[in-house]
Image (cartoon, grey):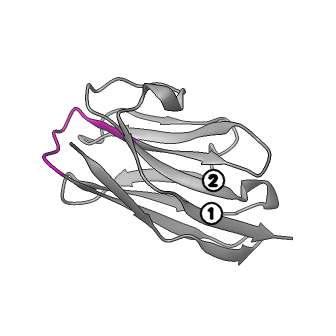
Amino acid sequence: QVHLVESGGGSVQAGDSLRLSCAASGRMFSWYVMGWFRQAPGKDYEFVASTTLSGLTIHYGDSVKGRFTISRGSAESTVFLQMNNLKPEDTAVYYCVADLRGDFSRWLGDYDAWGQGTQVTVSS
C-alpha cells in the first residue's frame, strides 16, 4: 500500500512561484506513475502533471504547460511540482496521486492512491 503526503502549498501573489513536494511511503518502482491533480472551489478535479518514477514519460495539463514542471527526487519516492508564473486561476487544492500499474490517465479515479491535498492560493 502506498501512502502519499504533500507539502509546499501556500499563499502567493500572481507571478510568484511555489514548489510542491510529494513523498510516498511504501515500495516504489520506476514504472509507477506519480502526479498531481487540483480542484478549484466549485470545480471538478483537473489533471495537472504526471511522471513515471523513471522520469522518462511526462505529461502536463494544457493549462499549466510552459509554467509548471514535474520532476522526481533522487530517491524514487518523491516528486516535485515547480509552479512558476502563478495565476489566480491556479488557486486550488493540489493532490498528489500514484498509479501502481504504470498507466497514464487524466482521470483521478484511475489512480490507486492520493494524498490529503495542499492548498495553493494565488492573489492578483
Label pair 1/2, CB-CB below 8 angstroms: yes
User: In the rendered structure, which amino acid carries the disc numbered 2?
Assistant: Arg
Q: Which residue was labeled with disc 2? A: 67
**Which residue is located at x 30 percent, y 35 percent?**
56
Tell which of 30 and 11 is nearer to you: 11
Q: Position of residue 24 (x, y in %)?
A: 27, 54
Q: Give left or right: position of 66 versus 53.
A: right
Query: Residue 48 appears in which quarter of the rendering?
Result: top right
**Which residue is located at x 40 percent, y 31 percent?**
111
- Chief secondary structure of the magenta span? loop
Q: Which residue was labeled with disc 1? A: 84
Q: Is residue 70 magenta?
A: no
Q: Position of residue 61 (x, y in %)?
A: 61, 36
Q: Position of residue 2 (x, y in %)?
A: 25, 46
The residues tagged by marks 1 and 2 sit, at their Cα atoms, a distance apart of 5 Å
Crowding near the residue tagged with mark 1, few <14, some 14–19, many ≥20 C-alpha atoms within 10 Å:
some
Q: Determine the secondary structure under disc 2.
A: loop
Specify the quadrant that holds the C terminus.
bottom right
Q: Position of residue 57 (x, y in %)?
A: 36, 32
Tell which of 41 and 19 is nearer to you: 41
Q: Does 49 appear above or below 84?
A: above
The magenta segment: 26-34
Q: Give left or right: position of 3 versus 71.
A: left
Farthest-out residue, right: 124
**Which residue is located at x 48 percent, y 64 percent?**
20
Q: Is residue 29 magenta?
A: yes
